[in-house]
């Protein structure tokens, strides 16, 4: 558009064709990557087919993760990300879109450092429908949950597993966005808002995973919701996202007030407040959802 506005119609047409070709190549590469993720063999199957005498290397959890149920659940959740095709595809999509939206807007000159919160929102969605992602393994998990404490530790460990990936990635996207838009002064408040939103998404994800679980069919590469359960999926995801935004309202209001009241010297406080608020609200969401999870497992 800029070239055509200057009368350089040939250059404008060439840029348009180049953009269309780049978009076509990107979509083709994206489709091939997703198809490969959805159709590649399960890592656990390949591992089981190895010779019996071959010793496997110690797992990640044995070296770095805590013991007990927490470490076991974290390691299991991280293995799902690597082995399960649908879980892997969902993570790849969230990671890519969470980076593309703020970075592309920044490169086009229309971005702001606050767009980095989009990464926290996209990654927080992975907390939704936690037990539906277990598919047939849900019954194995259900048999190990007999008390509210067991349910709390299960949900807490799943949230911690997500934080292993989402927390550093959210910080990375925020820093990259701030560098591209050249607004380093807004970095602390953007990080604080991102951490608060991530915590709110984990909290609402824990609650909706318990209140509105839905099945994910494994016999179809193109369907992520079982027939007749689309309404549950919409309630879980959209309702949870709206609730997460409302839960972040106090911190958003504080940030706006500091800007309006010319309190820019205090905006750095949004970072520790956002981190603390996100941790508190995610803990509250997990604690609230745990009793219902125990009740459902006992009933099952």
Image (cartoon, grey):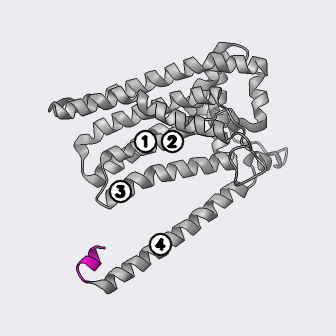
- Could you say where residue 53 lies in the image, as x and y percent from the top left? 84, 44
Q: Earlier in the sequence, mark 2 or mark 1?
A: 2
Q: Earlier in the sequence, mark 3 or mark 2?
A: 3
Q: Earlier in the sequence, mark 3 or mark 4?
A: 4
Query: Label 3: few (<14), some or many (≥20) within 10 Å?
Result: some
| Element type at mark 3 | helix
What residue is disc 3 on?
A: 105
Q: Quadrant of the N terminus?
A: bottom left
Mark 3 → mark 2, Cα distance in angstroms: 19 Å
The stretch drawn in magenta includes residue 5: yes
Place residue 15 in its image quadrant: bottom left
What residue is disc 4 on?
A: 22
Place residue 247 in its image quadrant: top left
Q: Nearer the viewer, mark 1 or mark 3?
A: 3
- Could you say where residue 8 lies in the image, as x and y percent from the top left? 27, 84
| Element type at mark 1 | helix
Mark 2 → mark 1, Cα distance in angstroms: 8 Å
């Amino acid at each position: 558009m800029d070239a055509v506005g200057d009368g350089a119609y040939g250059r404008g047409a060439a840029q348009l064709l180049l953009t269309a070709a780049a978009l076509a190549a990107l979509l083709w590469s994206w489709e091939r990557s997703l198809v490969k993720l959805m159709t590649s063999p399960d890592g656990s199957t390949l591992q089981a087919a190895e010779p019996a005498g071959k010793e496997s290397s110690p797992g990640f959890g044995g070296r770095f993760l805590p013991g007990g149920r927490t470490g076991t659940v974290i390691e299991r959740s991280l293995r799902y990300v690597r082995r399960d095709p649908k879980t892997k595809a969902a993570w790849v999509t969230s990671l890519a879109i969470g980076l593309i939206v703020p970075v592309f807007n920044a490169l086009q000159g229309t971005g702001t450092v606050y767009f980095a919160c989009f990464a926290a929102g996209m990654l927080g969605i992975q907390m939704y429908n936690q037990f539906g992602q277990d598919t047939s393994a849900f019954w194995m998990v259900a048999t190990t949950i007999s008390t509210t404490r067991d349910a709390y530790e299960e949900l807490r460990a799943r949230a911690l597993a997500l934080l292993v990936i989402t927390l550093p990635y959210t910080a990375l996207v925020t820093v990259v966005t701030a560098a591209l838009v050249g607004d380093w002064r807004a970095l602390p408040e953007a990080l604080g808002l991102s951490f608060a939103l991530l915590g709110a998404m984990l909290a609402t994800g824990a609650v909706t995973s318990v209140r509105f679980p839905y099945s994910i069919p494994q016999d179809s590469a193109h369907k992520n919701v079982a027939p007749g359960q689309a309404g549950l999926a919409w309630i879980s995801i959209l309702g949870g996202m709206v609730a997460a935004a409302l839960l972040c309202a106090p911190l958003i209001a504080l940030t706006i007030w500091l800007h309006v009241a010319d309190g820019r010297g205090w905006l750095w406080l949004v970072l520790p407040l956002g981190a603390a608020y996100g941790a508190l609200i995610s803990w509250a969401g997990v604690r609230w959802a745990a009793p219902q999870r125990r009740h459902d497992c006992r009933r099952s």
